[in-house]
Amino acid sequence: KQEVTQIPAALSVPEGENLVLNCSFTDSAIYNLQWFRQDPGKGLTSLLLIQSSQREQTSGRLNASLDKSSGRSTLYIAASQPGDSATYLCAVMGGSNYKLTFGKGTLLTVNP
Amino acid sequence: SAVISQKPSRDICQRGTSLTIQCQVDSQVTMMFWYRQQPGQSLTLIATANQGSEATYESGFVIDKFPISRPNLTFSTLTVSNMSPEDSSIYLCSVEEVEGRGYTFGSGTRLTVV
């Protein structure tokens, strides 16, 4: 059974800092990995999708990497802003059951 | 990417009653997914809804408690039946984008049962 772990559970940084969020998964037979953002009490906004054959994806200040063999992904946020404050969720689509498995998320607070 | 309209955005309900959540997609999709997110937890898949057939429920979820309708390729409803305070959660619908381009989620329904 696929398990997804996100570290740290919470992170507080000053505005302008670069930061890294970590995601690990136990079964490396995945089709893709997706990073989402969730604002309090709201739905999910897709940030980046990395296919299993890819190593990284970039969108603006965000860069996500994938090391499938070691079961790890990172989300790098450059020059953080207070508007980046949210919960960031990592989800993998497994190779055996085509279902999304989510981590519990990292709660990010960027202080002005 | 697909755009999903989910209603209601939030509701406060009395225990023992039922609430129906609707999701409308702006394009035709084969499968729609329903998730629950309990307070402080991550998302758990409730069921997968295919048009023209019964939904497929995950372990721990049953049709009597969470009946689902999928009348066409752009619409689905999830009903939370005979609610108790333990059903207080955010409920989300989702679709898979074409060509393996990931998943899109609705804006969520924040349900509080009192």
Image (cartoon, coloured by chain):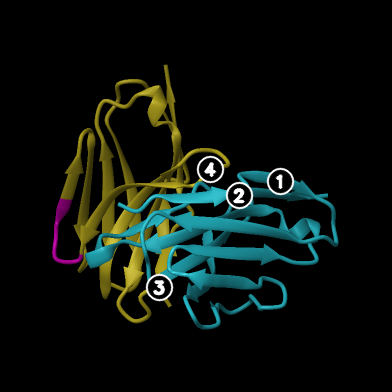
Image mark for residue A43: none
Disc nearest the viewer among 3 and 2: 2
Reading the image, the residue beneath label 3 is A2
Region in magenta: A52-56
Q: Nearer the viewer, residue A99 or A66?
A: A99
The Cα atoms of the two marked residues, 3 and 2, are separated by: 27 Å
Reading the image, the residue beneath label 1 is B11
**Label 2 is found on which chain of the structure?**
B
On the image, the x and y values in percent for residue B94 come to 45, 60
The residue at 47%/76% (across/down) is B51
Image mark for residue B109: 2
The residue at 53%/71% (across/down) is B70
Mark 2 neighbour class, 10 Å CA radius: few under 14, some 14 to 19, many 20 or more: many
* Residue A45 placement, left or right of A79: right
Tell me if residue A4 can be seen.
Answer: no
Mark 1 neighbour class, 10 Å CA radius: few under 14, some 14 to 19, many 20 or more: few
Letter of the cyan chain: B
Mark 3 neighbour class, 10 Å CA radius: few under 14, some 14 to 19, many 20 or more: some
Mark 4 neighbour class, 10 Å CA radius: few under 14, some 14 to 19, many 20 or more: some
Question: What is the three-letter code of the residue carrying label 1?
Answer: Asp
